[in-house]
Image: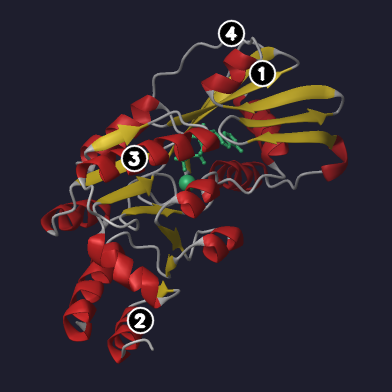
Amino acid sequence: SIPLGFFGGIGAASSKGILIKGSNYLEALNSVDAVVFDKTGTLTDGIFRVAKILDSPEFTKEQVLKFAAYAENHSTHPIAVSIQKMFEEKSGNQIDENRISDIRERPGFGIQVQMDGKQILAGNARLMTEAGIAVNEVQEAGSIVYIAVDHAYAGAIVIADEAKKDSKAAVKGLRNLGIGLIAMLTGDSRRIGDKIGKELEIGETYSELLPHQKVEILERLMLENKKKNPSRKPGNVLFVGDGINDAPVLARADIGVAMGGVGSDAAIEAADIVIMNDEPSKIITAIQIARKTRKIVW
Ligand code: ADP
Ligand code: MG
């Protein structure tokens, strides 16, 4: 039978907006050695502001935004949603879906569509390089979405995403609890990854990762952790994400934690623990409750 203390712990967590899907995860929280965070939507708001639009000799800013919004119309990525909103606010127009076809979303790259018979690409430098399109690398304080029309550079959109208010306190608090490794994985550029990592004082930052590379890094960290702590049972590398391009990592981690607010339904389903209000510092609360529960149970 399950000791009463576990139910008390799960109840205490749930009253703080932390959904723990079983007493085994509460127990596992006691032996967390490493906490690995996703960036966008997890440590940052995932609500992007369009900071700047860059035009080109061929296209105006209005045209660049329009191409981007048409390309991003079907995507639910936070970058796409911000571009859609910006277009609607600035132009007052709605997207005419009949003008778009052949939509190909590329996780970790961006998106490709046909619009009025033209091919539109919207995405990062990696997408442009892959398509053989030369771009002037933009040096701005934000994530850059490059736009290409029929294989020619058309312009770019600079968008900014900021760290959540309690992200820094979360990292510091985890360190104070004795968590040895705190890391961040992101599909975003090295420039942005390093900037956020430094700001939040994260030990290790891995950038420019495709979804399957996020899994590879997590597995490497899990292996290294096992070597450092050979007597440990499994259950000690915790990953926190929102499920947009990181659902496979969420599933692979010893303890997968999803953000309940911004998180995708699939992520919430796949996770072992759900943080309802999306505050990363709730990981600290969860570990503290687990440690208290253990004292009562044993
Ligand atoms: P993170 O790992 O930080 O949560 P993602 O894996 O979701 O980030 O995205 C990685 C990168 O891929 C983004 O920073 C962006 O450059 C690019 N990207 C992904 N989807 C899109 C999209 N729909 N439009 C434009 N760029 C995108
Ligand atoms: Mg994310």
Residue 47 visible in this rendered orientation of the protein: no
Q: From the viewer's side, name the closer residue of 166 and 29.
A: 29
Q: Position of residue 107 (x, y in %)?
A: 60, 36
Which residue has dot 2 on it? Answer: 10
Q: Position of residue 101 (x, y in %)?
A: 84, 35
* In the image: residue 167, left or right of residue 134: left
Which residue has dot 1 on it? Answer: 59
Q: Does residue 203 lie above or below 46 as drawn?
A: above
Number of other residues with Cα within 10 Å of mark 2, as a class: few under 14, some 14 to 19, many 20 or more: many
Q: Quadrant of the C terminus?
A: bottom left
Of badges 3 and 2, nearer the viewer stands: 3
How far apart are the two marked residues, 2 and 1, measured between alpha carbons? 57 Å
Which residue has dot 4 on it? Answer: 134
Q: Does residue 50 lie above or below 18 as drawn?
A: above
Query: Does dot 2 land on a helix, a strand or a loop?
Result: helix
Of callouts 2 and 1, the N-terminal one: 2
How far apart are the two marked residues, 3 and 1, measured between alpha carbons? 50 Å
How far apart are the two marked residues, 3 and 2, measured between alpha carbons? 29 Å
Residue at 26% of width from left, 35% of height from top?
Answer: 204
